[in-house]
Amino acid sequence: MSQPSAQVTAAEISRIAGVTRATVSNWRRRHEDFPAPTGGTESSPLYDLAAVQEWLHKRGATPSAPPQQELRTALRMHSAGIGPRLFPLVLATSTQPAEELAKLAELPDSELVERANSATTHLPEVVPDAGATPYAQEEAPAVRALLRTVQAHGPQEALDLLASRELEDAAKTGTSPTPAALASLMAGLLPGDAHNVLDPACGSGTLLVEAARHGAEGLYGQDLVPVQAQRTAIRLLISSPDATSTIHVGDSLRADAFPDLTVDAVLSSPPFGLRDWGQDELSLDPRWTYGVPSRMDSELAWVQHALAHLEPGGYAVLLMPPALAFRTSARRIRTELVRSGALRAVIALPPRVLAYAGIAPHLWVLQRPDPNDDERPSVLFLETTAVARDPQSRSREAGTDWAAIERSVLPTWVAFRDTPETFTDAPGLARAVPVVDLLSEQTDLTPAHHVRETPADIDPAQFAERAFDLRRQLAQTARPLTAAERRWRSAGESAREWRWATIADLTRGGAVTLFQTAARSPKEDSGGNESGAGQPVLVVRDLLTGASPSGTAHDIRPGDEQPIQPGDVLLPRASASGDGSFVRVADDADAEALLGPHIYLLRPNAQRLDSWFLAGFLGSRDNLATASTSTGSFTHLTPNRMRVPLLPLPEQSRYGAVFRGVYELRAAARRTAALAQETADTLTDGLTLGALIPPDGDVPQ
């Protein structure tokens, strides 16, 4: 029995066809044979997907859609559950060369389905609820789209996309992902001899993948959501084939799948704020060594669950909400964790590091007390907000500098862990607080309340010299902002009207070539012999901060290296910004680098398009809004839908020169703002700490 076709909106049709929404509206008005709405409302109609695809095919109006969009469209044509059924095919194709995947995708439907069924007959037993379910011939488009997605973007992106439909209500299912950089930091906090690692709320498996990358050989996971457990099992088989993994489905607090297991380490990002976590039926559970958590303190149930699964001396790193550090209902258990020495460190992360929450979460580092070890007289507190952002860019768009956090946090933690008695505080970053000083009426564990911002020893002469130098730099940097004044000409009584072309149109016409590269998966390690080794790589953080290329060839899938040329226009696939400040034209310095993943490179034909003209119009707010979709804190761009006006090359050059000046103006403003903030902070610290005194006479305003 064939599946009913899905319904799509006009916006989705525009993404499928690679055109603007205005073009779709124009098709509806001008073509009587355009499919009639089959649902929705008058203002937001829905159309039969199969009918739309047939209409587009007849008119030759369907360009080559991105593989991910092709897969999303194919999934919509089938009922829920098709995504997980395709998980085994991701595993089966993950080791296939790109050329082989391309050949398979071109097979007729019947042969393609037969090959897919043959490849997925025997699914490893490690996958929860594993069972071979043959693919039907009407599912051939989904199979074909999956092969193309794996070929273009790797198995991990394919897995994420397949799972997305099953996990649409992430807030209710607790399936929000742990950022890869955060997972790397958490795994890095574990000692090097942590061979067996458990994640009792494993989600998509990001933490277990990182644990394996850091040397773990035994990986154990459990998750309440079946799709997540299956996804984790498949992901580990792909990324860590040499490790032994055991993944189960179920509620770890109510139905622990590993009741007798103790491990070297626990890594977890458990769900926050659960009220129905089982407090009533679990009140006598032996795991509550430090006290029975209240109904509103489910996070402390996860903390004690982790400690119960550790070998004596084993470590746990858990992501926690910041309120747990001071919440009154949690004070008694916090006190016992501190008093016993089980809590070793609390690390405050910057705000908005989690896509699903604007909070600034904490990492709790715990260690199961060993009766044979010495007492632990202090707890380490780290505050990472100051080191988390590029000092040259304090804007939100700069994102979180995870490399800077790792450089600051990991050596500091290791120094404290190995020799706490000789640990020296780091002003503004870290402080070891004696246990006796923490055991107060509140037992407040908020790092910002313990980490001192300024050093104890202050040199007034150095402060004064620093303040003078900053004022001098600020004056020099701000000069370009006001040096040139220009009277802009009005376009007349009405704004200029353009004749537009989309990037899809320009690509088909040979005026622009679009390039992307794929990220390297954990299993793709060729030992450093791949082409491009040693060349810098332009990565997303460089675009967002205006920095020089800072990545390495390890960021790129082997064989996917794409050199950057002067005049290339670069923009990220996703950004937290709603403006075009991140659109960049490559210069001679960038031309020494390779293109990193998650970046679009548009190479204009210099005989037909001016690079700065193209970049300027791509960075307009209207253009970005038309060609973007928002998911939480980020905006995802689809460059094929962007558009530029059709102008002669000399006139493009005139516009391009001005757009280049605007880019330089933004860069100068960013540098000036950073210096102004640093100057103000230095003066305030100097005056309040007694290192500086007000100047004689009137203070200039």
Image (cartoon, grey):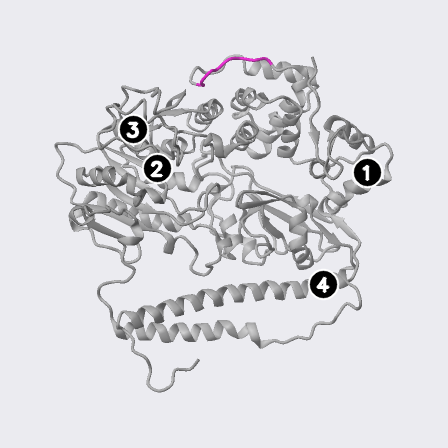
Q: Are marks 1 and 3 in contact (CB under 8 Å)?
A: no
Dot 3 and dot 2 residues touching (CB under 8 Å): no
Read off the residue under disc 4. 653
Q: Secondary structure at mark 3?
A: helix
User: Is residue 363 visible in the rendered structure shown here?
Assistant: yes
Label 1, label 3: how many angstroms apart (C-alpha)? 58 Å
Residue under label 3: 305
Which tag, 4 or 2, sits closer to the chain's start? Answer: 2
In the rendered image, the vertical position of residue 659 relative to residue 699, given as above or below:
above
The N terminus, quarter of image: top right
Which residue: 30% across, 48% down? 446
Packing grade of label 4 (10 A; few <14, some 14-19, many >=20) is some
Distance between the Cα atoms at labels 4 and 3? 64 Å
Q: Nearer the viewer, mark 2 or mark 1?
A: 1
Please tell me whether mark 3 or mark 2 is closer to you in this view: 3
Q: Nearer the viewer, mark 4 or mark 2?
A: 2
Which comes before the other along the chain, label 4 or label 3?
Answer: 3
Q: Secondary structure at mark 4?
A: helix
Q: Do the residues bearing badges 2 and 1 touch, measured as CB atoms within 8 Å?
A: no
**Inter-mark Cα distance, 4 to 1:** 36 Å
Q: Position of residue 179 (x, y in %)?
A: 45, 40
For label 3, the crowd category at 10 Å Cα-Cα, with few meaning under 14, some 14 to 19 and many 20 or more, is many
Distance in Å between CA atoms under marks 3 and 2: 19 Å
Q: Amino acid at mark 1?
A: Arg
Instruction: Give the magenta-colored segment's residue range.
Output: 127-134
- Which amino acid type is shown beneath numbered disc 2? Ala
Residue 570 percent location from the top left of the image: 60, 51
Helix, strand or loop for disc 1: helix
Label 1 sits on residue: 28
